[in-house]
Amino acid sequence: MNEYILFDASLRDRFLAFISARGLTAEVRPDPMEGFVVALPDDLADDVEDAIEDEYAMLMSEQVSLIEAAGEDSGRALMRVTATLADGSSRIVQLPADYARRLFEHFSVEEIHELVSAIVQSAVNPVEGPMCRKPSEPAGAD
């Protein structure tokens, strides 16, 4: 499942309307910390997924503007990103909001997910030894 978090009910409703207009159904649940999680199947056509990510990025920019306009920036010190582990299970990673905003300015939701997943997998399964080695060379070989 692809999951998107929105903090504002009106932005959530706009996102759901956008999804519905494409003939898709989403699961919506409250986020345990704050806001709403909108979950979509992960087997969508690339062009549909690209359109959804573009819409979500626009809504996230609006969310940041709403937070800044309301002076609530310090109230949202963390943002959450779902990371997928090697066994297929997922974990929530909390990022400082300032870093998360910068990521959203430069990367798609999918790219952020992939980046955070790679970091988590590397932390769970560290590779010892030099960074530069032949692909067939085992980690730690000198």
Image (cartoon, helix red, strand yellow):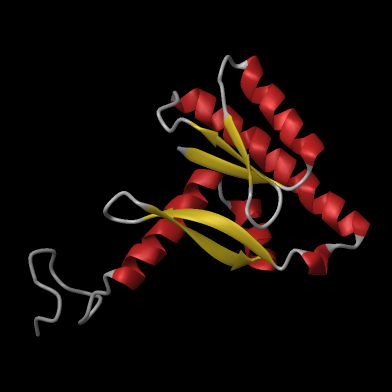
- Residue shown at 51% from the left, 30% from the top: 49
Give 31 or 84, whichever is nearer the viewer: 31
Give 38 or 104, whichever is nearer the viewer: 38
Q: Quadrant of the N terminus?
A: top left
Residue situated furthest bottom in the rendering: 142
Quadrant position of residue 140 = bottom left
Q: Is residue 1 left or right of residue 78?
A: left
Quadrant position of residue 131 = bottom left
- Residue shown at 62% from the left, 40% from the top: 29
Query: Tag count in the figure?
Result: 0
Q: Quadrant of the C terminus?
A: bottom left
- Residue shown at 37% from the left, 60% from the top: 118
- Residue shown at 28% from the left, 55% from the top: 86
Residue 49 versus residue 134 in the image, above or below: above
Q: Position of residue 124 (x, y in %)?
A: 31, 70
Q: Is residue 130 left or right of residue 1?
A: left
